[in-house]
Image (tube, rainbow, N blue to C red):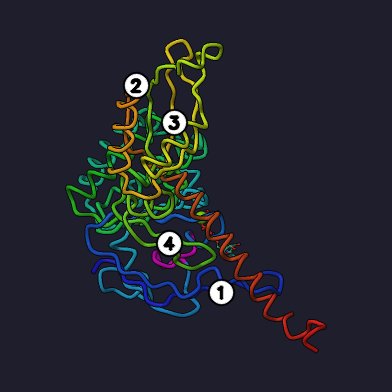
């Protein structure tokens, strides 16, 4: 087991108010996995990552990295590579050059000077920072500093990478490069990676397990594809044409929407959630359809039959799985409305004995 987290709680006290940033978090992460940590602002992601890198001590609970307790900070720091994108500025020496910073941290992790130099050279090349190797860190742009921080975490080829918004500030090309590199570390060296990011495609493309935290609690823990299916239902994306009805002489280009909706309901047991004209002249329409009575595949075949029977044509019919971002937003909204309902129920329960007719 690479990362074990057992009942971790972290309570902060701010202006006399107590905040449970982490409330009884338990997780086991297998060696070699690539796990995404997602959650809204203030969910507790950075707090958890900082506890695992020994930068913060938990209020209660235990955690182990490769069977070493996080209380043994020196040993843990030897095997962990970490990036804190948002507060990263403080983890570099501003008055030292890029190369000196990286050499300092590289040799600190036990690498020989020649190995450290070679790795630093190739990573700087990879991220197009070769020209900046002698520049002082304080003269770098935000994105460049972020790249140096990521390079710093990678130079020792750590067994475990704990990355908190590591690509914050990266341009599009560098983000793609970072994704490829992290993927390679995970696949080639078996590096266990816990990645926090608000960049949804990054999490979606890289990770095979998603841990979602909200208000200090784990609210989901599954594969990204499963999460999407759980959070938002799959739709059918349909592009089709139907010939105009003979009776529809004066409104030839308009689909008799209500009739079509009824047909889809009756013969495919499904609900049309959006229907638009795509090409009025050729009677082409685009629709998204939510399966209700049948499975996704059966809905697709029933709609196909329906359109062909009506002498229409199908240009595209395919399942549409929403993006991770859409699913995440839908899930949070669902969670919020459930919490509001529970709150409502609790309030009702409390007021119930006090109602007039009951007194
Ligand atoms: N040093 C601190 N003192 C007091 N409260 C803190 C401290 N650090 C974090 N918190 C609080 O703990 C909670 C969790 O914060 P954390 O930084 O872990 O969130 P996050 O999930 O990383 O959010 P973001 O997506 O914005 O980075 C927040 O309510 C935050 O205000
Ligand atoms: Mg954070």
Q: CA distance from mark 1 to mark 2?
A: 62 Å
Q: Dot 2 corresponds to which residue?
A: 312
Of the residues tagged 3 and 2, which is closer to the observer?
2
> Which numbered disc, 1 or 2, marks the residue closer to the eye?
2
Work out how far the residue at label 3 is from the one at label 2, CA to CA, in angstroms: 14 Å
The image shows residue 317 at horizontal and vertical percentages of 32, 31
Give the labeled residue for mark 4.
Answer: 49
If you read the primary sequence from the N terminus, does the residue marked by circle 3 or circle 2 appear first? 3
> Which quadrant is the C terminus positioned in?
bottom right
What is the x, y in percent for residue 185?
A: 23, 47
User: Is the CB–ligand 1 distance for label 4 below 8 Å?
Assistant: yes
Magenta span: 46-55
Q: Of helix, strand and loop, which one carries label 2?
A: loop
Kindly identify the residue that appears in the image at 22 percent across and 43 percent down: 184
Q: Is residue 23 left or right of residue 300?
A: right
Q: Residue at x 28, y 52 (%)?
A: 208
Point out the tag, 3 or 1, that comes first from the N-terminus.
1
Mark 2 neighbour density, 10 Å: few (under 14) some (14–19) many (20 or more)? some
Residue 285 drawn above or below residue 197 = above
User: Residue shown at 31%/46% (left/top)?
Assistant: 206
Residue denoted by label 1? 11
Q: Quadrant of ligand 1?
A: bottom right
**What whole-number distance in Å separates the C-alpha atoms at marks 1 and 4?**
15 Å
Label 3, secondary structure: give it: strand
Q: Nearer the viewer, residue 218 or 34?
A: 218
């Amino acid at each position: 087991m690479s990362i074990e987290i057992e009942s971790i709680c972290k309570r902060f006290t701010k202006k006399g108010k107590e905040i449970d940033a982490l409330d009884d978090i338990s997780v086991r992460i297998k060696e070699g996995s690539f796990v995404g940590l997602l959650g809204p602002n203030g969910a507790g992601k950075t707090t958890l990552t900082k506890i695992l890198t020994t930068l913060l001590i938990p209020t209660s609970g235990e955690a182990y990295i490769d069977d070493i307790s996080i209380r043994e900070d020196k040993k843990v720091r030897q095997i962990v590579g970490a990036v804190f994108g948002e507060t990263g500025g403080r983890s570099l020496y501003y008055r030292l050059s890029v190369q000196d910073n990286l050499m300092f941290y590289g040799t600190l992790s036990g690498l020989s000077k020649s190995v450290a130099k070679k790795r630093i050279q190739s990573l700087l090349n990879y991220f197009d920072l070769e020209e900046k190797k002698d520049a002082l860190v304080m003269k770098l742009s935000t994105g460049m500093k972020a790249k140096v921080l990521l390079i710093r975490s990678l130079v020792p080829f750590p067994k475990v990478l704990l990355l908190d918004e590591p690509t914050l500030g990266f341009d599009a090309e560098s983000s793609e490069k970072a994704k490829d590199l992290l993927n390679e570390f995970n696949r080639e060296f078996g590096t266990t990676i816990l990645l926090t990011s608000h960049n949804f495609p990054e999490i979606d493309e890289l990770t095979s397990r998603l841990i979602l935290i909200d208000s200090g609690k784990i609210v989901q823990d599954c594969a990204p594809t499963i999460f999407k299916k759980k959070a938002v239902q799959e739709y059918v994306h349909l592009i089709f044409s139907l010939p105009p009805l003979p009776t529809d002489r004066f409104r030839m280009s308009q689909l008799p929407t209500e009739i079509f909706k009824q047909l889809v309901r009756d013969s495919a047991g499904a609900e049309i959630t959006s229907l638009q004209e795509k090409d009025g002249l050729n009677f082409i329409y685009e629709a998204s359809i939510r399966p209700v009575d049948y499975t996704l595949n059966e809905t697709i075949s029933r709609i196909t039959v329906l359109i062909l029977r009506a002498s229409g044509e199908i240009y595209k019919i395919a399942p549409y799985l929403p993006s991770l971002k859409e699913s995440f937003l839908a899930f949070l909204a669902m969670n919020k409305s459930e919490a509001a309902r529970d709150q409502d129920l609790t309030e009702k329960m409390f007021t119930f004995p006090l109602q007039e007719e009951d007194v």
